[in-house]
Image (cartoon, grey):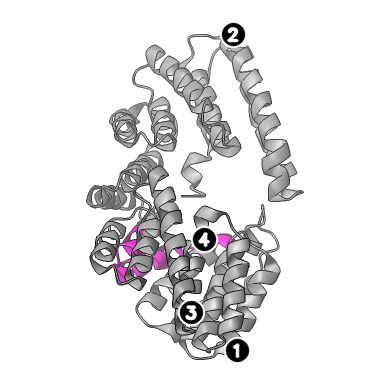
């Protein structure tokens, strides 16, 4: 999931905070906001890796010290405890230290003991529980936030839409897709122009094969031309991806072209590079579908030059194009480069692609080994994330290649209820 702005809104929450009589609390709150704003500025001047590995943890620690000072001054203030809990959740997420989630829940439970109707505390608790994959409890928490929206200090309409979006995301993660779609609908009904809600409902519909309906959401998300180039590119590329699924390759290529031409220079955190690479990747796939294989290879090489985190996918796409050109030895090399470029648990697609090429070359024993490797990787991944649609899909593809059709059909059926699929 993820880049969901709903769960990275500390600064927004601080601005929405109700006025407090205690001057010390207001001063501490101001210093925390300033620290976060300074951190954001520093991040723009450095690489994403620098932000993640150096600045982030230290700034979280500074913020937590400030919260502890604020709690010392005003221990029965539910708002301070809520913000501390939300900060601990963010810290756990970005540092990978999941034990911190328990500290977050303690802080949020303190907030709710003081004020059981604090909607922000329930909202933050829902996000924390979702991060811990305690989905049913997360739904209950967000429902409590929705019940108490009248207590929210700020734009209650926007916040209510955001809470329904949170509810949809949790239900989606739990595999409860029909309920998730109803919650997405509520979020969009309340604020039709809500970009995140439109994009996420569109992606859910896309994953369920409702490509024409997803296009409507992506069009709505792109309708505000004042959005950043990255936001526009996200909506456009998502629409183009849906057009590819329904065979409208020329229309999709035209949209990928538009994303490549956008000026991303003002976008922070390297997002421009990401979407530029995604545009070239889509361009390559569209060109391959149109039979322009040499041009498609050039597009994939552009992606690889930009070195986005998904360079693995570009090697896989290049391998597929080379295979269709019957350049099998070079295709094998591309799939091997894909395997080298990513973590083992992300590589089943490359193993399946390699198996397919080996099969075409008549190297059936080697192909079987490649398919078996893909299945082993998927099985390891599904122990941790049993609802991961990609893993079920790729397992099904490998089983089908091996002629194990009934097992393949069962895996594909589970992929159809996916909450995450590329």
Residue designated by label 2: 72
Whole-percent x, y for residue 273 in the image: 66, 63
> Given this view, does label 3 or label 1 mark the residue nearer the observer?
3
Residue designated by label 3: 363
Residue 189, numbered label: none
| Residue at mark 2 to residue at mark 1: CA–CA distance | 66 Å
Residue 300 figure quarter? bottom right
Q: Residue at x 42, y 34 (%)?
A: 132
Residue designated by label 4: 347
Dots 2, 1 in contact, CB < 8 A? no
Residue designated by label 1: 294
| Residue at mark 3 to residue at mark 1: CA–CA distance | 26 Å
Which of marks 2 and 4 precedes in the sequence? 2
Which of marks 1 and 3 precedes in the sequence? 1
SS for dot 2: helix
Q: Residue at x 33, y 41 (%)?
A: 167
Q: Residues within 10 Å of mark 4 (few under 14, many from 20)?
A: many
SS for dot 1: helix
Q: Residues within 10 Å of mark 3 (few under 14, many from 20)?
A: few
- Residue 13 can be seen, yes or no: yes
Dots 1, 4 in contact, CB < 8 A? no
Which of marks 4 and 1 precedes in the sequence? 1
């Amino acid at each position: 999931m993820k880049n969901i702005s709903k769960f990275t809104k500390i600064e927004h929450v601080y601005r929405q905070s109700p006025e407090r009589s205690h001057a010390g609390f207001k001063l501490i709150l101001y210093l925390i906001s300033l620290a976060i704003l300074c951190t954001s500025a520093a991040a723009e001047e450095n690489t994403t890796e620098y932000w993640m590995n150096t600045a982030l943890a230290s700034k979280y620690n500074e913020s937590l010290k400030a919260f502890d000072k604020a709690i010392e001054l005003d221990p029965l203030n539910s708002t301070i405890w809520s913000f501390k809990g939300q900060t601990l959740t963010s810290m756990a997420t970005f540092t990978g230290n999941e034990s911190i989630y328990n500290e977050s829940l303690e802080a949020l439970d303190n907030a709710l003991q003081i004020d059981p109707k604090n909607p922000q505390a329930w909202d933050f608790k829902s996000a924390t529980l979702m991060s811990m994959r305690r989905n049913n409890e997360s739904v209950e928490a967000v429902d409590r936030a929705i019940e108490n929206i009248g207590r929210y200090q700020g734009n209650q309409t926007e916040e209510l839409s955001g809470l329904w979006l949170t509810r949809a995301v949790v239900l989606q993660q739990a595999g409860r897709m029909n309920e998730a779609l109803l919650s997405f609908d509520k979020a969009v009904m309340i604020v039709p122009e809500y970009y995140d809600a439109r994009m996420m409902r569109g992606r859910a519909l896309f994953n369920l094969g409702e490509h024409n309906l997803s296009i409507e959401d992506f069009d709505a998300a792109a309708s505000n031309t004042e959005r950043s180039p990255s936001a526009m590119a996200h909506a456009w590329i998502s629409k183009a991806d849906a057009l590819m699924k329904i065979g409208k390759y020329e229309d999709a290529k035209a949209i990928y072209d538009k994303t490549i031409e956008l000026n991303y220079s003002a976008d922070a955190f390297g997002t421009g590079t990401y979407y530029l690479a995604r545009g070239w990747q889509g361009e390559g796939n569209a060109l391959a579908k149109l039979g322009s294989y040499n041009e498609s290879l050039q597009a994939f090489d552009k992606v690889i030059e930009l070195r986005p985190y998904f360079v693995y996918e570009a090697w896989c796409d290049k391998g597929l194009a080379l295979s269709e050109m019957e350049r099998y030895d070079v295709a094998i090399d591309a799939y091997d480069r894909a395997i080298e470029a990513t973590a083992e648990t992300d590589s089943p697609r490359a193993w399946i692609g390699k198996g397919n090429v080996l099969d075409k070359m008549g190297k059936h024993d080697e192909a079987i080994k490649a398919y078996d490797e893909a299945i082993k990787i998927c099985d390891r991944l599904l122990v941790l994330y049993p609802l991961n649609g990609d893993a079920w899909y790729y397992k099904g593809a490998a089983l089908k290649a091996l002629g194990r059709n009934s097992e393949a059909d069962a895996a594909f059926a589970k992929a159809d209820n996916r909450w995450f699929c590329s």
